[in-house]
């Protein structure tokens, strides 16, 4: 899918150099991947403290069975 974006050339060039990318397209793709990964990590953080654990579970007993 071709998309036209207006992005500051200085930002793209700086990101291209820092990331050692060959083209501005690679910069945008990598930036989007990192953005998506970051947002997924934020979603995972909301789960902390919401999972109930079985108080009777004994992991040591489980290891001995194998």
Image (spheres, rainbow, N blue to C red):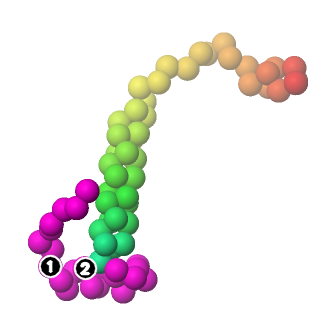
Q: Is residue 65 left or right of residue 41?
A: right
Crowding near pointer 1: few (<14 within 10 Å), some, many (20+)? few
Q: Which residue is depicted at the point 32% across and 49% down? A: 39
In percent of width and height, residue 5 lies at 15, 68
Of residues 25 and 15, the one nearer the viewer is 25
Question: In which quadrant of the rendered image does the C terminus lie?
Answer: top right
Q: Quadrant of residue 11?
A: bottom left
The reply to whether the magenta stretch includes residue 9 is yes
Question: In which quadrant of the rendered image does the N terminus lie?
Answer: bottom left
Q: Is residue 2 left or right of residue 26?
A: left
In percent of width and height, residue 16 lies at 34, 82
The reply to whether the magenta stretch includes residue 15 is yes
Label 1: which secondary element: loop
Q: Is residue 8 visible?
A: yes
In percent of width and height, residue 4 lies at 15, 66
Residue with the most extreme top position = 56
> Where 38 sits versus 10, above or below?
above
Residue position marked by numbered label 1 in the rendering: 8
Q: Quadrant of residue 23?
A: bottom left
Task: Measure the alpha-carbon separation of dots 1 and 2.
Answer: 6 Å
Residue position marked by numbered label 2 in the rendering: 12
Contact between marks 1 and 2 (CB within 8 A): the answer is yes
In percent of width and height, residue 30 lies at 37, 66
> Where 36 sits versus 62, above or below?
below
Q: Which residue is depicted at the point 47% across and 24% down? A: 51
Q: Quadrant of residue 8?
A: bottom left
Q: Which residue is depicted at the point 37% across and 58% down? A: 33
Q: Is residue 1 left or right of residue 54?
A: left
Q: Is residue 38 visible?
A: no
């Amino acid at each position: 899918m071709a998309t036209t974006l207006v992005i500051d050339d200085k930002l793209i060039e700086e990101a291209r150099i820092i990331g050692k990318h060959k083209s501005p397209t690679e910069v945008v793709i990598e930036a989007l991947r990192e953005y998506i990964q970051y947002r997924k990590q934020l979603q995972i953080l909301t789960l902390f403290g919401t999972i109930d654990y079985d108080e009777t579970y004994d992991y040591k007993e489980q290891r001995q069975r194998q």
